[in-house]
Amino acid sequence: MRLPSVDDIERRMPKPEDFESRARGTELTARVGTALGIAFGICFLTGLWSHFQYTTPGWVPLGPNPTQLYRWTQGLHIMSGTAAIPLLLVKLWSVYPRLFSLPPKKLDRTLVLDLLEKASIGVLVASSLFQVISGSLNIAQWYPWNFSFRSTHEAVAWVAIGSLLVHIAVKLPIIREALGAPIEHRDHSLDPDAPTRRHVLLGAFVASGAAVLLTAGQTVPFLRKVSVFAVRDGEGPQGLPVNRTANAAGSAKAAMDPQFVLEIVVGGQTLSLNREQLLAMPQRTHRLPISCVEGWSRNAVWTGVALRDLIALLDAPPSSELGIRSMQTIGAFSVSVLPAAYVEDPRSLLALELNGETLSLDHGYPCRIIAPNRPGVFQTKWVNRLEVKT
Ligand SMILES: Nc1nc2c(c(=O)[nH]1)N[C@H]1C(S)=C(S)[C@@H](COP(=O)(O)O)O[C@H]1N2
Ligand SMILES: [Mo]
C-alpha cells in the first residue's frame, strides 16, 4: 500500500471555495465580530475589576461605596460573557472555511506573514474558547481541572484581549470596508430560499439576547420568572439562595454547638462573646446584597452588630483591617480579610438575623459577615474569630 503523498492530501482537503453558503461573508463576520468585540471588552474590564477585589492593589479604590457596585460589575461580567457565546460560535462558523486555505508555497515573506496571522488567530480562538468554557463551568461549580480557576481565568483573559487587539489592528481596513458595505450579497437571488446573511446576523443577535434573558434573572429581579436557565432561581431558606450549605462546608456541628463563642483578638488581648452577648449589643439593620462572583445576586435585610462596634470593645480604631475566620472544615473560602475601608463603615455587620429571622444554619448561623459592595465569596459564614491586623 502506498502512503498518500502531500499532493494527495491537498487534493482531498476541502478548499475555502468548497463551502458554498452565501450566508457567509466578510460583511457578516465584521458585524458579528463588532458585537463580540464589545461583549469581550465589557467582560474583560468587569473581570479585571473582580480580580482587583482579590488582589487589592493599592492604587485601586476599593471600598463599601457604591453599595451595589460589585453587583452591577459582576452581573455585567456574566451577562456579557453569556452574550458572547452565541456570537463567538457564529463568528467561528462564518470564517472557518478559511482554515483550509493553504499557505503560500514559496518560502518567503508572504509565507511568514501567513503563518503569523494563522498563529495569532489560533491564540485568539483558543483563549476565547477557554474563557467562555472555564467561566461557564465555574458558574456550574464544576471544576474538572486542578489549576486555580481565578488566576488562570485572569491570565488567559490578558492573552485573549491582547490577541483580540492584534486581530483588530491587522484587520482594521477590512473591517471598516465590510461595515461600510451593505450586508447582503448582491446576487443572493440565485437561490431565494437559502438563508441570507441578514438571517444569520439576526439569528446571532437573537440567540445572544435570549441567552442573556434566560440567565440574567439571577441578578435582575424583574427577569426572575423569565430566566429558566439561571443557576440560582433566587429561592432558598429565608428568601435567599445558599451558595454552600453548612453540611457541604463541614461547619454544621461547630455552628450548632451551644458552647459557641466568638473570639475577638486585638494585639495580645482576646475577648470571647456568646450569641446572647452579641444580641445584647446595639443592633443595626441594613439592606445589603449578596453578590456572588458566579453572577447571581440578591438584596436582603440583615441585622447584627457593626464590626467597628465589636473591635471598639478592645479599643481598636474603626479603620482596622480585620482577619475573619470561620468554623468551616471543608473547601475554600473559610477565611477572608476585610480591608479597613469596609470595617470603618457602620453598615459592615456581623449579622445575626436575616430578613427578620434568626440567621439560618445554611446562611451562616450563629453569625456571618455582611459588608456593602463586597464580593459574595468574602461574606464569610459561620464566623468564630475576628482578628485585628496590626
Ligand atoms: N465560610 C464560608 N463562607 C462563605 C462561603 C463559603 O464557602 N464558606 N461561600 C461564600 C459565597 S461564594 C457566597 S456567594 C456567599 C453566599 O451566601 P449565602 O449562601 O448565605 O447566600 O457566602 C459566602 N460565604
Ligand atoms: Mo459566591
Image (cartoon, rainbow, N blue to C red):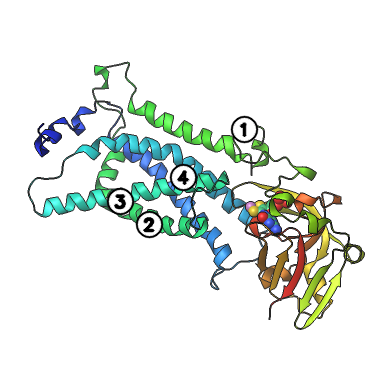
Q: Is residue 64 visible?
A: no
Q: Quadrant of the C terminus?
A: bottom right
Amino acid carrying mark 3 in the image: His
Mark 3 vs mark 2: give the one in front: 2
Among the two numbered marks 3 and 4 on one chain, the one whose residue lies closer to the N terminus: 4
Q: Quadrant of the N terminus?
A: top left
211 relative position to 104: left or right:
right
- Pointer 1 residue: 228
Among the two numbered marks 2 and 4 on one chain, the one whose residue lies closer to the N terminus: 4
Q: Is residue 3 visible?
A: yes
Mark 3 burial class by Cα count in 10 Å: few <14, some 14-19, many 20+: some
- Pointer 4 residue: 133
Name the residue at 82% across, 71% down.
Answer: 310
- Pointer 3 residue: 167
Amino acid carrying mark 4 in the image: Ile
SS at badge 1: loop
Mark 1 vs mark 4: give the one in front: 4
| Marks 1 and 2, how far apart at CA | 33 Å
| Marks 3 and 2, how far apart at CA | 12 Å
Among the two numbered marks 3 and 2 on one chain, the one whose residue lies closer to the N terminus: 2
Among the two numbered marks 1 and 4 on one chain, the one whose residue lies closer to the N terminus: 4
98 or 221: nearer the viewer? 98
Judge whether 224 appears above or below 327 on screen: above
Q: Are marks 2 and 4 in contact (CB under 8 Å)?
A: no
Q: Quadrant of residue 306?
A: bottom right
- Pointer 2 residue: 159
Amino acid carrying mark 1 in the image: Val
